[in-house]
Image (cartoon, rainbow, N blue to C red):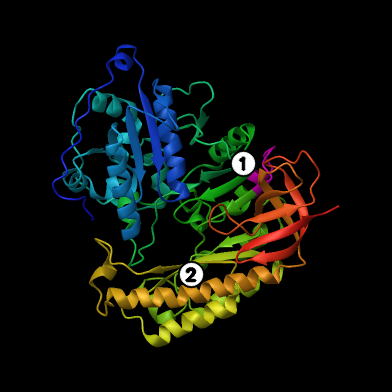
Amino acid sequence: MPSHPPGAPPAQRALPGAARAAGRRSVRLVTLGCARNETDSEELAARLHAAGWTLSRDGDADVILVNTCGFIEAAKRESIAELLDAASAGARVVAAGCLAERYGAELAEALPEAQVLSFDDYAEIAARLDAVLAGERWPAHAPRDRRALLPISPAERPRAARRGAGIPGHGGAPDLPPGVAPASGPRVLRHRLDDGVMAPLKIASGCDRRCTFCAIPAFRGAYVSRPPHDLVAEARWLAARGVRELLLVSENSTSYGKDLGDIRLLESLLPQLAAVPGIEWVRVSYLQPAEMRPGLIEVMTSAPGVLPYFDLSFQHASGAVLRRMRRFGDSVRFGALLEQIRGRCPGAGVRSNFIVGFPGETDADLAELAQFLADARLDAIGIFGYSAEDGTEAASLPGQLPEHEVGDRVAELAGLADEVMAQRAAERIGEPVDVIIEQATGDGTATGRAAHQAPEVDGTTTVSGLPDGVRPGAIVSGVVTAADGVDLVATGAA
């Protein structure tokens, strides 16, 4: 785990006396990492709001609560830097989220500027922050394997989750105040922290896979699905607050429903969410290629409002490397899956992430991956260098590559990925396209995302020739006229 510069003293802050006397407490939430963390932050915000805390988006706050990311080394460094920046702002600093859960007392010792909380503290977050303002030092937790908190049998997990097993998005909560949504029935809170037209919707937490490079299951726990009726209720609440696109998130969306007795439950959930009044688009993320089913592909390429967008977690294309990762597939199987998807919907969007420099990766393995990228015509590609993560099996595998060699491989494949993505975008010139507007300039031009472009990671589409009055959240039709890397330019349909 990265540490902050040695010799930095713990932050000692004077409490704002007037604010304390008046009973006002303010908190600013900083969210790092993935969209799953965004939903967790909105749960924390709802709990704090219900307890009388003022949520500050900008400016001064009594407490800065940083929802950290602890997935890979770069994310850890970003989280540490954010915590140090928050401490320098003069507020009390609290670390929550994955980095805090993963390292607990070790992080608290390395970073005395911040109080460190566990997922188990979320249900009592207001009381924890009250204690922080009172000058108390809450003892940081000793990390543990959170998979052991739930039964081995998936079918027995929902009951344990309802009892509040420290699962963000699944725990108990006080009665709902006005304007706050249920995130898992009437027991979980949600408070929106922005007013965008897209919102993530967490459909499950945890993971049962045992990929050798990944530490997430140990600190996020075993897989637990949220009941469909809770998700539909939350989707209605989001739609009432201006959300037009739902981004379904989890650690593994293709496993949704396995603990509820129906491994194909996602196929029936997607049309239900798309039918919610006000919801125009439903997008699914975090799909495991080995778990893709013909029925799921059919729903994702034909159900109204469900986008033909496939965020497939390939990770590599060499069968030998994938077996060392304890994953399934190879370039032939992955190519066949893409053919199946595009056979049903030629314009389907596909993105994936890949790890290069994995222990034992040969030049032939890298060449196979490069050839797959050239052939697969993916819309969006993420290339990441392997880093040995604490507590993972891969960290002790033979064939660890030097850091400079991993960096060289990343640079080589990232350059190829940029070329492939630009070519794929150029192939879309002349295609009709629907775009959800996120920003309108008022001069007949607006910027948004096409169906194959997920929020923040897959580029944007700028549409001209639109009628006056087009607002964020509208879905407009056009024809692609140009491409600039992964970004598209379109002319609105008459």
Tag 1 and tag 2, C-beta contact below 8 Å = no
Q: Is residue 63 above or below residue 235?
A: above
Q: Of the residues shown, which amino acid type is indicated by label 1?
A: Val
Q: Is residue 419 left or right of residue 140?
A: right
Check residue 197 in the rendering and tell me which mark sits there, or answer none: 1
Farthest residue toward the top? Answer: 22
Residue at left 39%, top 51%?
206
Farthest residue toward the left? Answer: 7
Check residue 301 in the rendering and tell me which mark sits there, or answer none: none
Residue at left 53%, top 57%?
457
Give the camera-side residue of 80 and 225: 80
Give neighbour class at mark 2: few <14, some 14-19, many 20+ (Cα, 10 Å).
many
Query: Is residue 274 on the magenta stretch?
Result: yes
Q: Of the residues shown, which amino acid type is indicated by label 2?
A: Phe
Determine which quarter of the picture holds residue 51: top left
Q: Is residue 221 visible?
A: no
Figure disc tally: 2
Name the secondary structure under disc 2: loop
The residue indicated by pointer 2 is 314
State which mark lies toward you, 1 or 2. Answer: 1
Query: Is residue 435 on the magenta stretch?
Result: no
Residue at left 61%, top 54%?
267
Name the secondary structure under disc 1: loop
Q: Residue 411 at what x, y percent from top left?
A: 42, 74
Give neighbour class at mark 1: few <14, some 14-19, many 20+ (Cα, 10 Å).
many
Residue at left 47%, top 51%?
250
Q: The N terminus appears in which quarter of the rendering?
A: bottom left
Q: Is residue 328 left or right of residue 296?
A: left
Magenta range = 271-281
Q: Residue 263 at what x, y percent from top left?
A: 52, 56
Q: Is residue 341 above or below residue 306?
A: below
